[in-house]
Image: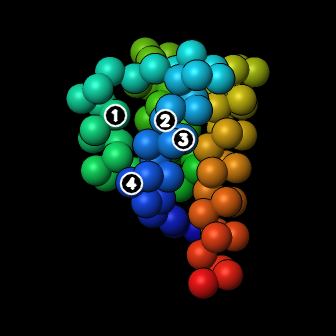
Amino acid sequence: MKIRLADTETEGLLYDLCVKLGFCLPVPLQKRIVNNPPMTVEKFAEAVYRGEGLDPLLNSALYQQVYEMVAKAFERHQEDNQSV
């Protein structure tokens, strides 16, 4: 399912990924992601992982952590928008 996170949700997710997992993307890449966020959990997690110069195809434990954080943000978005 495709979901477009709001700018504030995307910024918050990128902040959390930086603080909690050390995935602190360069500002130009952050801006690109905020302006045009990947619309699936998989694509978002891959964009962040590749942004750090890592290969998501290795499917490491660290990638799983990134994926899970992204998935939770997408779930929150769905829950928040279902109650509207």
Return the residue at label 3.
Answer: 13
Residue displayed at 60% across by 84% down: 84
- The crowd level at tag 1 (other Cα within 10 Å; few <14, some 14-19, many 20+) is some
For marks 1 and 3, the one nearer the N-term is 3
Residue displayed at 69% across by 20% down: 62
**Extreme residue in the left direction:** 28
Return the residue at label 4.
Answer: 7
SS category of the residue bearing label 3 = helix
Return the residue at label 1.
Answer: 30
Disc 1 residue type (three-letter): Gln
SS category of the residue bearing label 4 = helix
Q: Is residue 26 visible?
A: yes
Work out how far the residue at label 4 is from the one at label 1, CA to CA, in angstroms.
11 Å
Work out how far the residue at label 1 is from the one at label 3, CA to CA, in angstroms.
11 Å
Residue displayed at 75% across by 21% down: 61
- The crowd level at tag 2 (other Cα within 10 Å; few <14, some 14-19, many 20+) is many
Query: Do labels 3 and 2 touch, CB within 8 Å?
Result: yes
Q: Is residue 58 visible?
A: no
- The crowd level at tag 4 (other Cα within 10 Å; few <14, some 14-19, many 20+) is some
For marks 2 and 4, the one nearer the N-term is 4
Label annotation for residue 14: 2
Residue displayed at 57% across by 16% down: 22
Above/below status of 13 relative to 15: below
Disc 2 residue type (three-letter): Leu
Above/below status of 42 relative to 4: above
Disc 3 residue type (three-letter): Leu
For marks 3 and 4, the one nearer the N-term is 4
Query: Do labels 1 and 2 touch, CB within 8 Å?
Result: yes
Label annotation for residue 44: none
Task: Name the spot of residue 3 as percent of width and height, x first.
Answer: 51, 65
